[in-house]
Image (tube, helix red, strand yellow):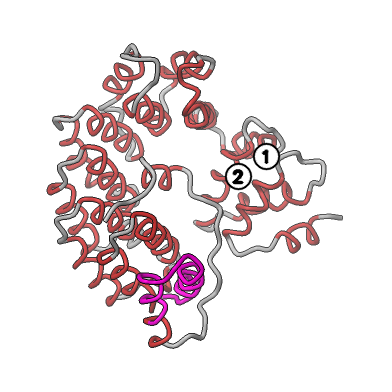
Amino acid sequence: MRLAPRFALLLALMFPAAIALSAPSPRSLNDLKKDRDSFLTGGDAEQQAAMSNLAQGGKDSVALLCEVIKKSKDRMRSSRAAHTLARLLEAPENRSEAGMDALERLAKSGDEPTLQATASALMHFKNDARARKALKQMVSRVGNPEIRAQVLSAFVFNIDKDKAESAYVEGFLNDKSEDVRVSAAGLLGLLGSQKGASLVSSALARPLSSGQPGALHWRAAIAAGQIGGSQFLPRLKAMEGDPQFRSFRSEIRDAIDSIEHENLGNQSAKDRQLASWLRDRRHGKWAANKLRTRAKSGDKSAEKILKDGASDKSNTVSEHALQALATLGITPGHAVEEHGH
């Protein structure tokens, strides 16, 4: 099995796609099993129809999608199944003991891309002891540094800022791979620690060995945003304007936005900034994702800022607010109608 885009998992963790899955369909389990088989063996049209049905199958689809990931030899099919599975598991009602059983079986695989896909699903079982144990075991077994960093990222997402796990994550500051060390430094930042900040600074300052930056600079830019220290801003802003780093300029900008936003300190000032940034081409997507995360956790002030932004027809980036609302189950028409007076 081969999974698709490079760094797909970490990008998904940092900048979740604005995709809303439909409500569970009334299809029977037997029908969903037929969809699984069609997805594995059918042509493009059959595959597309089958995945659409599985995406609407709720918790009944979870174990079936795990089977697709395990059995498929086609890179794109496996990738689509993994993406759909992760999106399904964002909804708490789709997480079940049967789904966890299936994921635990996948977690024992010796195939590293399969472990990568499994991590992207397990991370949504937040603070679940079984998920936490499985993710730790997977990290220890993955040899590929890129995938090891991604599985570690999934683990930190799963523990939901549980600082009791800081010592475990700190251990990866001594990993043999610099990519993993830098990723661990950023993840520690999410846990409130700047212990790896110097590693990130060194990676950001590293001269390019060729005309194109590699994974290290990309990871370091993200880690700087996760740590949030203002000491990173001069280098990040220099990189933002350097054509050598244009391949991940959006990640550099996101890191700058994150640091500048967190350094405001006062929540009222942060809210005013986000409301303003929604109307700005440069900052709109980052602001919408930030507000979406807050609103998803029950923050009503963040939801109101999104609704106000979506209802402002002069807002040049209102599509970002609309997309964020869609992932929260609020239709664009509802947001505009309610706040369009």
Above-or-below relation of 282 to 115? above
Image point 48% across, 44% down: which residue?
15
* Quadrant location, the N terminus: bottom left
In the structure shown, which secondary structural element does the residue marked by tag 2 occupy? helix
Q: CA distance from mark 2 to mark 1?
A: 7 Å
42 in the magenta segment = yes
Amino acid type indicated by mark 1: Leu
Q: Nearer the viewer, residue 45 or 19?
A: 45
10 Å crowding of disc 2: few (<14), some (14-19), many (20+)? many
Q: Which residue is mark 1?
A: 278
Image point 29% across, 64% down: which residue?
72
Above-or-below relation of 205 to 171? above
296 in the magenta segment = no
In the structure shown, which secondary structural element does the residue marked by tag 1 occupy? loop
Q: Nearer the viewer, residue 286 or 339?
A: 286
Where in the figure is residue 48, as x and y percent of width and height?
A: 50, 67
119 vs 233, left or right, is left
Asked if marks 2 and 1 touch (Cβ < 8 Å), the reply is yes
Q: Which residue is mark 2?
A: 288
315 vs 178, left or right, is right
- The range drawn in magenta is 34-58
